[in-house]
Image (cartoon, coloured by chain):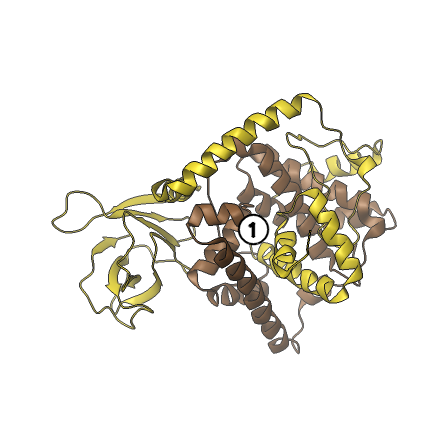
Amino acid sequence: MTVTEDTLVSYAFGHLASVDEAVVEAHLRAHPDDARTVAAYLDVLASLVMALPPEPLPAGGEEALLARVRGPATPAETRSNAPERTPKGVPGTYIPSRERPRRAVWWRDVLAAAAVAGLYVSVFTLLNPDARTARVLQGYRTEPGAVSYALNAEGRAEPLGTLVRLQDGRVFVALGVPPSADQVYQAWEIAGAPVSLGTFDGRTFLSAQAVTEGNTFGLTLEPPGGSDQPTSTPITLLEL
Amino acid sequence: MAARDEAALAELYRRYGPYLAALSRRLLADRDDVQGCVQDAFFRAWQAAGRFDPARASAKTWLVTIGHRVAINRLRGQKPNTLPLEAWDAPTPAGDPVERIQLEGAVRALDPVERELIELAFYRGHSHQELAELTGRPLGSIKSKLRAALHRLRDHLDDSDDDSSDEPDDRHERQGGEG
């Protein structure tokens, strides 16, 4: 395995298999520059987490943790239902493999079945852009507090797509078709002069900022790169 | 914590546990699993504390990375049940206000595709290949976009740190030498 910059990115995201992580960690020990790069990536990702709304910890959680560390030093998981990989993303977190829980033999059958199912889903998704969009849309629709709306076009019986307003006010849009090659979709928040929410050349879009409740969401077709203000009639408008 | 100080563990749990729970919430739907992940993350940190090197990573980064790995692995175990869910989320208004403002600026600096990829990769644990399948974009484009996004976020946060370096900021203190 050759460690490239992309490998370092995958490592930072925790996407590598255990054996590949071990290779990367050996590489990092020998290449301080790459180790600094990875450390910077991990710092960025940690910062993302520290900007999330903190979730209250359950009563008794601290006591349970302390009781656990005082107990026999076993690697038992609280409710492990997955083969656990050692968290090794930061220097100094390596836990020797002898401490890892052993995978029971019956897991092989489960993993084999999951692999077959995963392969089917991957191939199906790869070949079917509708399935890709549907999967992403389904995720948004099931977010706590998310509200879904049909995006309708005047004179058209079928909706153009779906808009999901997330709990934090951001909007996700999934459309039936992408724009033509020489155009992009541009999303707008309208409460007076339209304010651009961004452009996209595919079928899905997630706004970076919240759209205020009561304002209107609009979509126009614009030249690549988008426009400062709409240059065409909105293909859909929705009051949120 | 490296000195097996339970008070230090409890302090880190109180300080960072709510954020690890928030991260796990984005990766996992089940509340029991979320709290289990937080417990497992701190337990693993306790086990590995002797090897923590504050010169190479802050306690915050170290704990978040452990928490992310624990949640990702649990998510992988859940995938047969949660495969249709592609929920992803960007930083939302909460947490340390200074850090939140810096993060909001950094996230806004990403283009929509980069933002989507960062969030799908980090908050849903999708690999490069899975992202290519999900988004329909070439694998090479996924890789370059993710790399560019990380660099852009880092540059933006570095600039923000420089801008606020003269101001008292508990965040910097927190990134110091716990662990």
Residue drawn at x 61%, y 28% as measured from the top left: A111
Q: Nearer the viewer, residue B14 or A19?
A: A19
Residue B84 shows up from this direction: no
Residue drawn at x 53%, y 61% as measured from the top left: B144
Q: Position of residue B36 (x, y in %)?
A: 65, 35
The picture's colour for chain B is brown
Outermost residue, top side: A106
Outermost residue, front side: A1
| Residue type at numbered disc 1 | Phe
Image position of A42 with respect to B123: above or below = below
Q: Nearer the viewer, residue A209 or B132?
A: B132
Q: Quarter of the image containing the C terminus of chain B?
A: bottom right
Mark 1 sits on what residue? Answer: B122
- Quadrant in which residue B153 is drawn: bottom right
Image position of A121 with respect to A151: above or below = above
Residue B120 shows up from this direction: yes
Label 1 Cα neighbours within 10 Å, binned few <14 / some 14-19 / many ≥20: many
Q: Position of residue A116 (x, y in %)?
A: 53, 29
Q: Chain of mark 1?
A: B
Q: Position of residue A154 (x, y in %)?
A: 14, 51
> Which chain shows up in yellow?
A
Horizontal side of residue B48 vs A127, given as left or right: right
Mark 1 element type: helix
